[in-house]
Amino acid sequence: MFTFIFKRLLIAIPVLLILIVGTFILMYAAPGSPFATERGVPPAVLANLERQYGLDQPFYVQIWRYIWGIVSDFDFGPSFIYRDQDVNDLIAQGFPVTLTYGFWSFVVAVLVGGTLGIIAAIRHNTWLDYLAVGISIGAQVLPNFVLAPILVLIFTLWLGWLPGGGWQGGQWQYVILPVIALSTSFMASIARIARASMLEVLTSNFIRTARAKGLPMRRIVLRHALKPALLPVISYLGPAFVGMITGSVVIDIYFSTGGIGQFFVASALNRDYGVMMGITVLLGALTIFFNLVVDILYAWIDPKIRY
Amino acid sequence: MLATRAIADQLAHKDAVKGRSLWADARTRFFRNKAAVGGLIVLLLVGLFALIGPFIAPWDYEEIDWSVLGRVAEAGRPSLETGHWFGTDPLGRDLFARTVQGTQISLMVGIVGAFIAVIVGTFYGAVAGYFGGRVDNVMMRIVDVLMSIPYMFVLILLLVVFGRSMLMLFIGIGLVSWLDMARIARGQTLTLRNKEFVEAAVATGVGPFTIILRHIVPNLLGVVIVYATLLVPSMIIYESFISFLGLGVQEPLTSWGALISEGSGEMVNGTLWMLLVPLFFFVVTLFGFFFVGDGLRDALDPKDR
């Protein structure tokens, strides 16, 4: 087990480095100075600015400083547009918000999706099953950026039940719509995966044995079928996490929740390279870390995995 | 004796029993599937809409109807008299023409993205699977690495650094779309590699790349086609996502994502058609692709014959 974790770590670290170096090269190769504006800046001022941000140094010095800043001080560098803020400030501001609704979305997607899929499989070919399949097909064509306007239209404009945006320190009314918009398509995928694998497990030999010796259905499902049926769901958690991180950009933009995605898009539109790079690297690191955790979890639960 | 002779003669002259090929079989099974055929019809209609729409639209997608400007909520609603069949957008541009234009872009992105994925992914996966061993290990590790990068952010980065253009969008989408395909193709190749016909080809001295192109890839086609039909909608979703954020196609060009984003920003003003029209096309097309993909999977799956 420890060798397995060690090996996976050995892969994760180079991936992270590739990501950092890759984004850095992209930024370095970007045409024009980040401080150049349409009005034109005098060359002397430009040179001063670049010296202040260390952009006049050779490439390897810049990249070394950047990586070392992250590793030693967890410092993602300055913003090139806002003088009084650096990337860490923006992260500190936006990350708790993203984490709050991201966490709830994840919980909802896994719990509701998993339950739905398993119930659908147990009640195979009944109205419950058809309902679950219907929901998961419907949710497939409603990605978060499509669902969000629909939700606001129904619950804010027509019914007037929930606010259509804002955050207000994370009061529950403000969290509900973002969570639904973000979690629905992943909930549907999880339901579909859980249903398919539960159906397969329920027809396998060891379940037949359990039935033959007269165990009640509840006990069969909870004690014998659940664990193997949930394995494929676990392997889907990695991609789901990536999808939610990406989706949070839409949520932040549409609901103005003030999460990290809002800063990312704003910096993309402003060409604020420092912020873009910082957020990409941070979210990339998170993704890689989460995939690592899922892999280890999977290897721990599934006895068939050799390591 | 004579009788047997006659039967033998008869048999000799009779035409050989016509074999049913995999594809003919699959075709009959596909057309028996109502949902799949429905999906196919919907897709054909949407395609037709994108192709002939520009010729029947009374307005151009860039043209501004000055008579509705400023009172879009009343004068810009869908009507037959003004020629704005789907209404206008907030700038007084005809939504029918813009939807046609957006459909063209979205479909093109979807199909081109899937096409790149098919070509690169199939070949990459087939090579990795066929050679196996260390080559396979290195090639698939690269795929793993690329997969664990949050591609959407990298794609947005690319679009910002190198300027927003259709070409950049295609390159960005093409960069990531082939990864899943490569995995699938590799998995299939691993089982194909040990089949007798490959062994026969090796024994007769056929080179490895010829084997991959002539013997492995044709046998992958079924899986590849199914996956490609499911890939088109996900490419459309990527593009719409980026356009929704305002980082995709640029004005006056548009796409479903851009139209949905525009419509959702305007719905407070009571101009619901701006959201509902592109939403309808988006949803209907995705449904079409998913149903066709499912139908193809059922039709081409040799497991349930």
Image (cartoon, coloured by chain):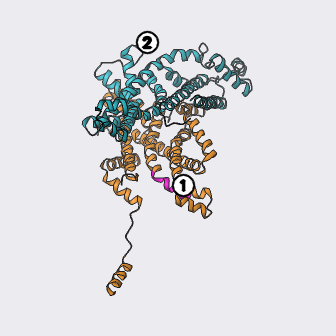
Instruction: Determine if the magenta segment contains residue A187.
Output: no
Give the percent coordinates (x, y) of residue A83: 61, 14
Q: Main secondary structure of the magenta part?
A: helix
Give the colour of chain B. Answer: orange
Q: Which residue is mark 2?
A: A169
- Asked whether residue A104 is in view, the answer is yes
- Image quadrant where residue B140 sits: top right
Outermost residue toward the front in this view: A213
Q: Which residue is mark 1?
A: B194
Give the residue at x 33% y 28%: B271
Instruction: Determine if the magenta segment contains residue B216.
Output: yes
Distance CA(mark 1)–CA(mark 2):
60 Å
Using the image, determine if residue B190 lies above or below residue A119. Answer: below
Using the image, determine if residue B3 lies above or below residue A10. Answer: below
Region rendered in magenta: B213-222
Using the image, determine if residue B217 lies above or below residue B204. Answer: above
Looking at numbered disc 2 in the image, what kind of residue is underneath it? Gly
* Residue count near mark 1 (Cα–Cα under 10 Å), binned few <14, some 14–19, many ≥20: few
Image quadrant in which the N terminus of chain A is located: top right
Give the percent coordinates (x, y) of residue A27: 64, 29
To which chain does the residue with label 2 belong? A
